[in-house]
Amino acid sequence: MAYAVTDIADLCPSKASETEKKIVNCTQAIESKKYSGAGLAGLLRNRGIVFAEELQEYGHAIADYSVALHLDSSGSDTYFNRALAYAAHGETEKTIADYRESIKLSPKVTDAYYDRGGIYFATNNYPSAIADYSAAILIDPKNSKALSGRGLRMPLQRSMAKLSRTSMRPFVLILKARKRITVAASCFTGKRNMTRIYLIVTPR
């Protein structure tokens, strides 16, 4: 969920019931020259939210968030929102960088830790994922999302570490010995240290 600027929400976007009207209201306020600095940055951020969440136009959202941050670089929520847009746009490194900036500015907000943990996990960086979930839990010991995330990922990390040291070696030898591989897939059972590797190798 993206964060809107509440003190100017009467202008953009919450008062409009239709997406197009929200964009019009935002744009009129932005171009009115009545706002500058943090106020203008807030309007741009709100329009960016509409682009991202209602229209899935992530490029436009990123552009608005970027201008907003140029005007007011203290907006941790704007970094967070742009990280969401970058993630939806498939730009992993920029996503992680923006979560980092959001955390620097608001180190007690757990959402950035949890979301960045998900990005780390998706890119197979299990230690960093677990560290982020743990950081969120330290801030909020009852954070169910972080508790669940860490609980699911820690056994997988341990299993994969064990496999990388021992169990994968025979399979690597098999792969080297065969020229044609039909499929190589892994299945996590959800139980501690119970990652199973399935290999189907066709004859030479």
Image (cartoon, rainbow, N blue to C red):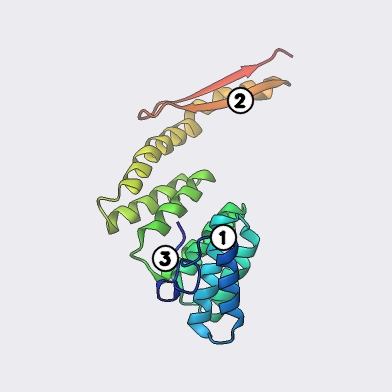
Q: Which of 8 and 175 is in front in this view?
A: 8
Q: Residue 203 location, x and y as percent?
A: 71, 12
Query: Dot 2 corresponds to which residue?
Result: 184
Q: Quadrant of residue 21 in the image? A: bottom right
Mark 1: few/some/many CA within 10 Å (<14, 14-19, 20+): some
The Cα–Cα distance between marks 2 and 1, rounded to whole angstroms, is 45 Å
User: Which badge, 3 or 1, comes first in the chain's sequence?
Assistant: 1
Whether residue 147 is situated above or below residue 49 in the rendered picture: above
Between disc 2 and disc 1, the foreground one is 1
Query: Dot 1 corresponds to which residue?
Result: 19
Q: Residue 130 location, x and y as percent?
A: 39, 48
Name the amino acid type tagged 3.
Ile
Give the residue displayed 40% in from the left and 36% down from the top: 158
- Circle 2 — which element? strand
Query: Dot 3 corresponds to which residue?
Result: 103
Taking the image as shown, residue 181 lies to the left or right of residue 125, namely right
Taking the image as shown, residue 173 lies to the left or right of residue 15, namely right
Give the residue displayed 70% in from the left and 19% down from the top: 178
User: Which badge, 2 or 1, comes first in the chain's sequence?
Assistant: 1
For residue 175, the mark is none
Q: Nearer the viewer, residue 39 or 165?
A: 39
Quadrant for the C terminus in the image: top right
